[in-house]
Image: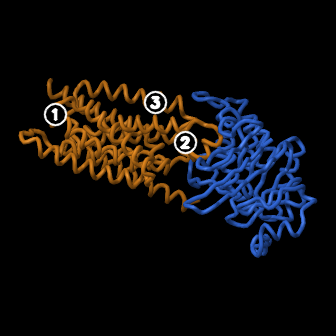
Chain colours: A blue, B orange
Amino acid sequence: MIEFKDVNFSVDNKIILENIDLTITTNEFVAIIGPNGAGKSTLIKILLNLIPNYTGQVFIEGKLNSEWLKTERIGYLPQKEEYDTKFPATVMDIALMGIAANKGVFARFNKQDKLKAMETLDKVGIKQFNNAQIGSLSGGEWQRLMLARALLTGSRYLILDEPEASIDKSGVNSFFDLLSELHKQGKTIITISHDLHMLNKYCTFLVCLNKTLHCHTETEMLTADHIKNTFGEALKLIEKDY
Amino acid sequence: MLSYAFLIHALLGALLSGISLAILSPFVTLKKIAYMGEALSHIAFAGIALALLLSLNLSLVTMLFVLAVAGLIGFVSRFFQTEETNVITIFLSVAMALGIILISAKKDYSFDLASYLFGNVLLINKTDIYSLIVLSVVNISFITLLFKELFYMTYNMTVAEVFGIRVKTVYYLFLFLLAINIVVAVKIAGVILVTAQLVLPASIAFQYVRKLKPAIIISILVALVASLIGFYISWQFNLPTGAVIVLVEFMLYLLSLIINKRSKVRN
């Protein structure tokens, strides 16, 4: 279970998040929606303890997030990962990053680790690229690699920041199919997305955010008013056109 | 016999210094922190000037001075929340200015300023050779034991931290080791040329390979070959060794660019 209790965050007196009280129960497939600048990525970064100067508290499984993250991992897919396309890393190298912390300092990756990574790359459908340089991957292949890395942490939680960005329509469908499969296998998934059609099809719980929480409800309970209240006039800007 | 011993010291010094910098070179290049090497070497210059002014142990004072200033840079950028690269550049210039003032303050100075700016292999003594051997062993052990952490540190530190990899501590250890390497190498390569020896070997290696481990080996080989050729040329034509080694490495770099370009055209 993940709990946000009265979380507030501002930058230079500009309010980014205000009075966020939110509880996400285990094994939900949660979608966070909202217009650009609504604070969606910030909310996730606060959960991951990547932003220090917020007020309020965040709990993961009853422990403060900072304490919980000292011993446990969250499988995270960042919106955009900064990397040099010429960086000398293969798909396997980046996938193994998910296992690295569990290996401890000084320990090297062994055959079993690589086998486990191969199985996961197979699961996300990019096993054949295991020796490819990361710079040669397409957008969809890259997102699948990010998912493989997140899965390899062995975490019960998967957090995705706009995973559909830079994937074509068929790629998005199969990516969300894969997430749905993982959800059925017991993962708690939290995803930020602009793709309302996709979220309606797969997600079980919806969080409408625009600095403050406008709604947090079961997806089938979502009404047009909820959407309108969250996005206001900006709604037409966030509908994805394939 | 004496000149032969000098020659052997100078050759060993050039080789070992080149190797120790080349081991770190791929990480410095990938992490894009060559400016750190430049800053540390310039700060070392002020440390050398301070040691000469106070007539204290040169290596020890320079090392302590570099570490103190590096700590100060970290403190200033964090405490005043200013851009770290700007603070480093400011401290680089201030260190050079301080070094020049300190040297001018030592009225009876009897040392060759150019030796420290451009390096002088003839300054190398037995202690330096032992230090360089220990340093090379420490460098190799460091990258062998912490390869996984160093690899992900150079890839993306923030993401590595999210995945629980202890890259921050490793990064500071790496900078500490880099500072020690630079302080030792300044005597041989000089303040101005040490950065070139830190960047060129890996820049050449990455023209041929796209994997980190082979790149480290090629970097070391490049440093070995360049040091041997550079040393021979400088000895034959009585030229400054550090500068000739850098020029040899530069020629190898140009060659690697041409070879890489040609192989891309063929493919």
- Can you say whether B131 is above or below A227 in the image? above
Amino acid at circle 1:
Leu
Amino acid at circle 2:
Met
Q: Considering depth in this image, is A219 or A229 the residue closer to the camera?
A: A229
Packing grade of label 3 (10 A; few <14, some 14-19, many >=20) is: some
Residue indicated by mark 3: B140
Q: Are marks 2 and 1 in contact (CB under 8 Å)?
A: no
Q: Quadrant of the N terminus of chain B?
A: top left
Mark closest to the chain's N terminus, 1 or 3: 1
Q: Is residue A133 left or right of residue A168?
A: left
The number of numbered discs placed on residues in the rendered structure image is: 3
Residue indicated by mark 2: B153
Q: Is residue A76 left or right of residue A105?
A: right
Give the Cα separation between the discs numbered 2 and 3. 17 Å
Numbered mark located on residue B54 in the image: 1
Q: Are marks 2 and 3 in contact (CB under 8 Å)?
A: no
Can residue B213 be seen here? The reply is no
Q: Quadrant of the C terminus of chain B?
A: bottom right
